[in-house]
Amino acid sequence: MFTFGIRHNLTHIVMVMGLAGLITFLVLLIRELDVPFGDVLGTDATAFTRYFRT
């Protein structure tokens, strides 16, 4: 963030917080997409087994 040459501290802090939030969101999104039947935001497999049951 220092490479942008921002002179105001508040603008710099907002940009750093936004970048940190974006990185955190992307890491959590990758984890949740990697484990769709996980604990936190996961779902169970009943809808899939009901739909694909022959």
Image (spheres, rainbow, N blue to C red):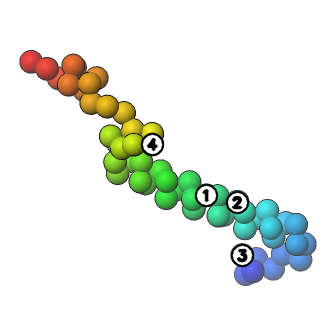
Mark 2 in CB contact with mark 1 (< 8 angstroms)? yes
The residue sitting at 47% across, 50% down in the picture is: 29
How far apart, in angstroms, are the residues tagged by discs 3 and 1?
14 Å
Q: Residues within 10 Å of mark 3 (few under 14, many from 20)?
A: few
Residue 18's disc is 2
Instruction: Write down the residue under mark 3.
Output: 1
- Mark found first going from the N terminus, 4 or 3: 3
Residue 4: percent from left, percent from top: 76, 77
The residue carrying mark 1 is: 22
Residue of label 4 = 40
Residue 53 placement (x, y as % from top left): 14, 20
- What amino acid type is highlighted by mark number 2? Gly
- Quadrant where the image shows the C terminus: top left
Distance, label 4 to label 2, CA atoms, is 24 Å
Image disc number at residue 45:
none
Crowding around mark 4 (Cα neighbors within 10 Å: few <14, some 14 to 19, many 20+) is: few
Q: Nearer the viewer, mark 4 or mark 2?
A: 4
Q: Secondary structure at mark 4?
A: loop
Q: Who's the residue at 31% across and 31% down the image?
A: 44
Compared with 53, 26 (above or below) is below
Quarter assignment of residue 24: bottom right
Give the spatial CA distance, label 3 vs label 2: 11 Å
- Give the mark nearest the N terminus, 4 or 1: 1
CA gap between label 4 and label 3 equals: 32 Å
Q: Residues within 10 Å of mark 2 (few under 14, many from 20)?
A: few
